[in-house]
Image (cartoon, grey):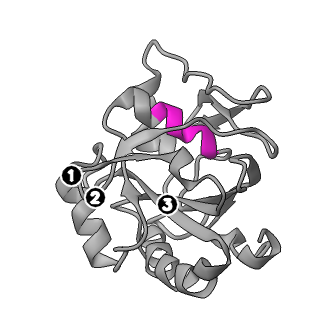
Amino acid sequence: MPANSDIRIIKDRVLPALLIGVLLTTVAAAQSPVGTTITYQGQQYSWTVYAEGDTVENYVMADSYGEDFAFYSMCGKTVLVAMAAGWCGPCQDLAGDLGKELQQYGNQGFAAVEVLTENSRGQLPSQSDLQSWRNSFGLDRIPVIGPESNQMASDIYAFEADGYIPSTSVIGPDMTVLSLDEGAGQRGGPSIDSFL
């Protein structure tokens, strides 16, 4: 686990609530997503995650403007999906960089989506939380979305292969996963232009 105390394992806060009597649902994908199991404080947590080449589900969530945002509205673009939580310092750093990446690559068919999985209190984000996140990091041109229910939160964790945030995944113009779950320390990996 990274030394930075702001990077927390998702299951530390969200997964126990989601997994009580319910195994995370399998998302609709072209190929069967793979399962991930991690052990934390002696307890195992499992959920289904995408693999490279899988077609992502058309998630529909409210954005920071109160409008429904559908993942498939990004068809035809290479999309960076950034998973974040309001209590996570490194997530805030990444959010500050998203606007710069959009500015650099936006005219080349690049788009980004910020998924705020929790607010600063570890709860599902409200409309106000999404607006605050958008305004705090200047994400006016990037959809900031958040799950509206525990079920929706469990579905969107299909992008989380290791349980750590922040993380980013890249979806191709045909809505297939090109790169999955790069953590904050891994963002030095493949650059956006390698996917364009």
As measured in the structure, the alpha-carbon distance from the residue carrying label 2 to the one carrying label 1 is: 6 Å
In which image quadrant can residue 35 be found?
top right
Residue 126 vertical position relative to residue 57 in the rendered view, above or below? below
Q: Which residue is mark 3?
A: 113
Report the amino acid beneath label 1.
Answer: Gln
In contact (CB < 8 Å): disc 2 and disc 1: yes
Report the amino acid beneath label 2.
Answer: Ser
Residue 177 position in % (x across, y down): 73, 49
x 37%, y 42%: residue? 61
Q: Earlier in the sequence, mark 3 or mark 2?
A: 2
Of residues 180 and 194, the one drawn nearer to the viewer in this rendering: 194
x 54%, y 57%: residue? 165
Q: Secondary structure at mark 3?
A: strand
Q: Which residue is mark 2?
A: 64
Of residues 110 and 91, the one drawn nearer to the viewer in this rendering: 110
Q: Which residue is mark 1?
A: 127
x 80%, y 72%: residue? 190
Report the amino acid beneath label 3.
Answer: Val
Q: Earlier in the sequence, mark 1 or mark 3?
A: 3
As measured in the structure, the alpha-carbon distance from the residue carrying label 1 to the one carrying label 3 is: 16 Å
Of residues 118 and 152, the one drawn nearer to the viewer in this rendering: 152
Toward the top, the furthest residue is 21
The tally of labels here is 3
Q: Residues within 10 Å of mark 2 (few under 14, many from 20)?
A: many
Query: Where the C terminus falls, by quadrant?
Result: bottom right
Residue 37 position in % (x across, y down): 69, 31
